[in-house]
Image (tube, rainbow, N blue to C red):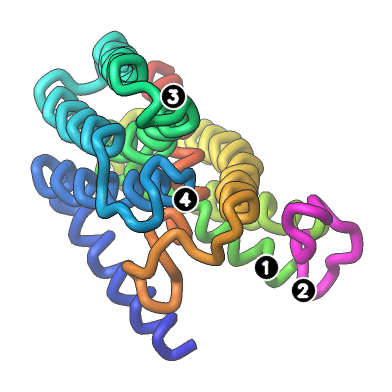
């Protein structure tokens, strides 16, 4: 527990510095985290063999991660480019699969593309949130997932009786899930007041509170799905943790699984809010 608390505190400090800095600093940190997360997923999904340090399908995916972030910095939120990178990766992996057959298997090609979308692509929406005019406030929203996790844990411990996903995650309960969502909305209401009071916007306080309550309600619900997906992958592959980068917590995917899953949704909801 001591190791977990210390590494968690260090993680929070690094997160604060990353999101406050914005620009190239935020992009650079996210690129590093994306590369680590991508490699954790490709290992879990057996894109590379257990005795391989890397292989061609993974290398192609890593190149796609770097290209994605370069284009992200240059072009910003251009969804056509996002789609082009995904399709380019898919085509490249398909070419390797076809012309080296049977050296690589179909699951390696599919796993490489999935890992790219799940970790680097979805995580990069934090950079897009930070790029909003009020991004120094909005970029924190994905981490509502951690508040949701905390409320879900303590509510489940105190009141949990009905299993949420008994086979996949026996300890999670419906009561805990409801408590997590409620905690997220409570944080969203407070956040909405702070946003209306300090952000350079003409959004009325009541509208801001209602908007952030909706965003955090959706995020709180989906963050638990994100956590269960990551747990399901680990259970399928028979592994305990995705990695050991963060002492006491595991790897990037162990700590950021739910954050990654909800970030694109929060981005699009925030975009709608900014047009109100």
Residue 271 lies, in percent from the top left, at: 39, 23
Element assignment for label 2: helix
Q: Residue at x 53, y 48 (%)?
A: 188
Query: Which of the numbered marks, if any, corresponds to residue 165?
Result: none
Dot 3 surroundings within 10 Å: few (below 14), some, or many (20 or more)? some
Q: In the image, is 175 to the left or to the right of 249?
A: right
Disc with the residue nearer the chain's start (3 vs 1): 1
Element assignment for label 4: helix
Disc with the residue nearer the chain's start (2 vs 4): 4
Element assignment for label 3: helix
Q: CA distance from mark 2 to mark 4?
A: 30 Å
Q: CA distance from mark 3 to mark 1?
A: 28 Å
Instruction: Nearest to the eye among marks 3 and 1: give it.
Output: 1
Magenta residue check for 14: no
Disc with the residue nearer the chain's start (1 vs 4): 4
Instruction: Nearest to the eye among marks 3 and 4: give it.
Output: 4
Q: Find out whether the residues at labels 1 and 4 contact each other: C-beta distance under 8 Å.
A: no
Magenta residue check for 166: yes
Q: In the image, is 72 to the left or to the right of 261?
A: left
Q: Find out whether the residues at labels 2 and 1 contact each other: C-beta distance under 8 Å.
A: yes
Which quadrant of the view contains residue 84? top left
Disc with the residue nearer the chain's start (3 vs 2): 2
Q: Residue at x 49, y 64 (%)?
A: 241
């Amino acid at each position: 527990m001591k190791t977990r608390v210390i590494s968690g505190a260090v993680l929070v400090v690094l997160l604060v510095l990353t999101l406050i800095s914005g620009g190239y600093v935020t992009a650079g940190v996210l690129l590093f985290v994306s590369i680590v997360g991508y490699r954790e997923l490709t290992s879990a999904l057996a894109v590379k063999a257990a005795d391989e340090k890397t292989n061609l399908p993974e290398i192609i995916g890593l190149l796609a991660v770097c290209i994605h972030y370069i284009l992200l910095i240059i072009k910003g939120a251009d969804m056509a480019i996002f789609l082009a990178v995904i399709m380019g990766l898919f085509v490249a992996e398909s070419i390797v699969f076809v012309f080296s057959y049977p050296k690589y298997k179909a699951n390696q090609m599919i796993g490489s593309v999935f890992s790219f979308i799940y970790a680097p692509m979805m995580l990069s929406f934090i950079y897009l949130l930070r790029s909003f005019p009020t991004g120094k406030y909005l970029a924190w929203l994905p981490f509502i997932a951690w508040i949701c996790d905390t409320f879900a844990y303590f509510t489940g411990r105190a009141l949990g009786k009905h299993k949420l996903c008994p086979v996949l995650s026996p300890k999670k309960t419906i009561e805990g899930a409801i408590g997590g969502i409620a905690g997220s909305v409570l944080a969203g209401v407070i956040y909405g007041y702070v946003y209306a009071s300090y952000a350079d916007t003409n959004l009325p306080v009541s509208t801001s509170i209602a908007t952030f309550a909706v965003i955090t309600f959706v995020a709180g619900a989906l963050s638990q799905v994100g956590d269960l997906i990551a747990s399901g992958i680990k259970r399928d592959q028979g592994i305990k943790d995705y990695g050991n980068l963060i002492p006491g917590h595991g790897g990037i995917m162990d700590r950021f699984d739910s954050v990654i899953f909800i970030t694109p949704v929060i981005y699009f909801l925030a975009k709608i809010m900014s047009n109100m």
